[in-house]
Image (cartoon, rainbow, N blue to C red):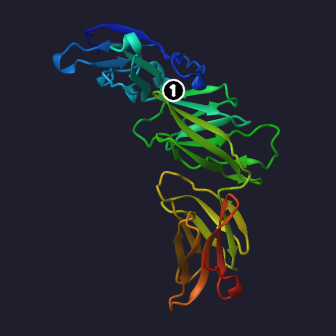
């Protein structure tokens, strides 16, 4: 049910004209996306605030536009009506980035309100990718090219606001080439990270993810990794088969066969200090250990029930890669790690 609006009606469109030169971009139009409407509130207790809506959404909560002399950025969320345009795209909410700034010079009493898409995904890889929210089935296809900026809305605002990436298979790829979805990563904090799409019958595919904030927008840049080397590498110098996985995120279980090495990256970068779990397959009693791969040097060894050292574990640097070595202490006593 629509309510009577009091105040000044302002028509606005999603536009990047006010962004600085280094961040100029032409946003891809989303089919059926209506313009925005803003209404100022005249209630004595709500002055300096406005509400926002689209034709397919309900009114947002009031948000302040008074600001200060510095940039004030944030996001405004609007819930999609069941009969709205965006409902066909499985969206339950639409977010708009809001930046409030005081004008300069003679217009210092004026507040400049910049409205932008909240999330923008840029695919700088050489192939098409798909992006989806963790825990949902809807996937957005993003074509390659730095000029392709795709606006992203969360399909389900009730689920975790994390993304996964999948490179799309092309006709020129080998028959056995097949990738899986990357681990989940958050896009709400400025950071750089590396994600790996698991590959069957081929090398692992790595990508750098750079997250930047520009006014009220969050820009997610997915681009080729700056190095062909993985962030981590695991070495198994023992006759045992090892099961390895990230603690708390065991969706991707990796096996290390005897005397085998394999590249590794975190399944999810959501934990502040992710750790790796190593289990010795078929051991009785069960043998396992938990390790932080970013800690260079000796780690706690794996002991037998009588306290005998069975396996030494250490992490060393090999160029940009951190290498974890799992060594059988009985068969390879001379290969036991030395102090850093």
Q: Residue 62 sits in which quadrant? A: top left
In this view, 131 is above or below 225: above
In this view, 92 is above or below 318: above
In the rendered image, residue 151, in percent from the top left (x then y), is placed at: 54, 26
Which part of the image, by quadrant, shows the C terminus? bottom right
In the rendered image, residue 188, in percent from the top left (x then y), is placed at: 46, 40
Q: Seen from this angle, which residue lies furthest front?
A: 105
Crowd class of label 1 (few under 14; some 14 to 19; many from 20; radius 10 Å)? few
Q: Seen from this angle, which residue lies furthest left?
A: 44
Q: Seen from this angle, which residue lies furthest top?
A: 8
Q: Name the residue located 52 percent from the left edge and 52 percent from the top edge.
A: 269
Residue 281 in view in this figure: no
Q: Residue 288 sits in which quadrant? A: bottom right
Q: Name the residue located 61 percent from the left edge and 69 percent from the top edge.
A: 243
Residue 185 in view in this figure: yes
Classify mark 1: helix, strand or loop: helix
| Count of marks placed on residues | 1
In the rendered image, residue 190, in percent from the top left (x then y), is placed at: 50, 41
Q: Residue 68 sits in which quadrant? A: top left
Q: Is residue 49 left or right of residue 231?
A: left
Q: Name the residue located 83 percent from the left edge and 39 percent from the top edge.
A: 172
In the rendered image, residue 293, in percent from the top left (x then y), is placed at: 57, 64
Residue at image mark 1:
89
Q: Is residue 139 left or right of residue 92?
A: right
Q: Is residue 246 left or right of residue 239?
A: left
Nearest the eye: 67 or 98? 67
In this view, 110 is above or below 267: above
């Amino acid at each position: 049910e629509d309510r009577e609006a009091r105040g000044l009606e302002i028509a606005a469109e999603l536009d990047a004209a006010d962004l600085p030169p280094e961040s100029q971009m032409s946003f891809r139009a989303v089919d059926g996306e209506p313009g925005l409407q803003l209404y100022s509130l005249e209630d004595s207790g709500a002055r300096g605030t406005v509400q926002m809506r689209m034709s397919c959404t309900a009114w947002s909560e009031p948000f302040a536009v008074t600001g200060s002399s510095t940039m004030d950025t944030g996001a405004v969320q609007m819930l999609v009506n069941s009969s709205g345009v965006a409902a066909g795209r499985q969206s339950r909410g639409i977010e708009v980035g809001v930046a409030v700034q005081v004008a300069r010079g003679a217009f210092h009493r004026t507040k400049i309100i910049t409205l932008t898409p909240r999330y923008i995904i840029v695919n700088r890889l050489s192939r098409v990718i798909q992006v989806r929210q963790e825990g949902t089935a809807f996937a957005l296809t993003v074509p390659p090219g730095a000029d392709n900026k795709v606006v992203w809305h969360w399909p389900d605002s009730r689920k975790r606001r994390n993304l996964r990436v999948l490179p799309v298979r092309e006709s020129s790829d080998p028959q056995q080439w097949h990738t899986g979805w990357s681990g989940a990563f958050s896009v709400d904090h400025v950071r750089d990270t590396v994600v790996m799409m698991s590959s069957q019958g081929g090398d692992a595919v790595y990508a750098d993810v750079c997250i930047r904030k520009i006014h009220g927008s969050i820009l997610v840049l997915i681009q080729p990794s700056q190095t062909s080397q993985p962030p981590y590498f695991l070495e198994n110098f023992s006759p045992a088969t090892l099961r390895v996985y990230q603690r708390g995120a065991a969706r991707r279980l990796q096996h290390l066969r005897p005397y085998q090495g394999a590249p590794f990256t975190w399944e999810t970068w959501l934990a502040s200090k992710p750790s790796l779990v190593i289990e010795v397959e078929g051991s009785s009693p069960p043998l396992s250990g938990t390790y932080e791969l970013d800690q260079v040097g000796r780690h706690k060894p794996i002991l037998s029930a009588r306290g005998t050292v069975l396996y030494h574990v250490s992490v060393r640097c090999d160029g940009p890669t951190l290498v974890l070595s799992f060594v059988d202490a009985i068969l390879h006593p001379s290969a036991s790690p030395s102090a850093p």
